[in-house]
């Protein structure tokens, strides 16, 4: 059974920062690529960032490049998303995802508003 639990969301002003975490309850974490997705109200879920199993390759949506950083701690079995220079259009529910097996977390709300 794979469980992914996100945390770290909240309300932040434009220009602010948040760090999301995704704790994985799995036997093996390091060998799997991981993603962050988000879904804004009335919009489709979109891929925000992805990271390879070996932490050697990352990819970002154009809308977050240069502002967001995905990383992982295989020792802690945790995925992170550092979000800087947040904009109101970043407001969404953010989901942790493991492509292998298509596992999803429950999501954490990020609201960017003054």
Image: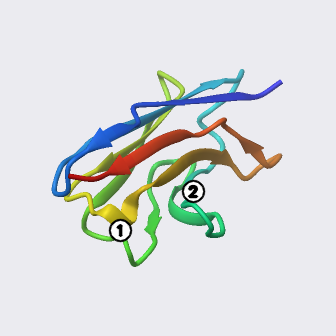
What residue sits 48% from the left and 42% below the top? 109
Q: Does dot 1 land on a helix, a strand or a loop?
A: loop
Residue ranking furthest to the left: 15
x then y, percent, for residue 75: 47, 23
Residue placed under numbered mark 2 in the picture: 37
Q: Residue 40: percent from the left, percent from the top?
A: 54, 61
Q: Given contact means CB atoms under 8 Å apart, are the residues at marks 1 and 2 in contact?
A: no
N-terminal label among 1 and 2 = 2
Q: Is residue 13 left or right of residue 6?
A: left
Q: CA distance from mark 1 to mark 2?
A: 12 Å
Q: Position of residue 72 (x, y in %)?
A: 44, 39
Quadrant of the snapshot with the N terminus? top right
Q: Which residue is mark 1?
A: 64
**In the image, what residue occupies the spot 33% across and 54% down?**
69
User: Most extreme residue toward the front, as rendered?
Assistant: 114
Above or below, comparing residue 2 to residue 82 in the picture = above
The residue positioned 53% from the left and 49% from the top of the image is 93
Using the image, determine if residue 22 lies above or below residue 54: above
Left or right of 56? Residue 102 is right
Q: Is residue 43 left or right of residue 79?
A: right
Q: Nearer the viewer, residue 35 or 46?
A: 46
Residue 60 screen position, x and y as percent = 44, 68
């Amino acid at each position: 059974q794979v469980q992914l639990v996100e945390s770290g969301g909240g309300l932040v002003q434009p220009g602010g920062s948040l760090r999301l975490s995704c704790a994985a309850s799995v036997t093996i974490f390091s060998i799997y690529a991981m993603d962050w997705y988000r879904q804004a109200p009335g919009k489709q879920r979109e891929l925000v960032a992805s990271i390879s199993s070996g932490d050697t390759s990352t990819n970002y949506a154009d809308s977050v490049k240069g502002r967001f950083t995905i990383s992982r701690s295989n020792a802690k079995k945790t995925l992170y998303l550092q979000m800087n220079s947040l904009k109101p259009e970043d407001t969404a529910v953010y989901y942790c995802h493991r492509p292998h097996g298509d596992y999803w977390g429950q999501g954490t709300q990020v609201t960017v508003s003054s």
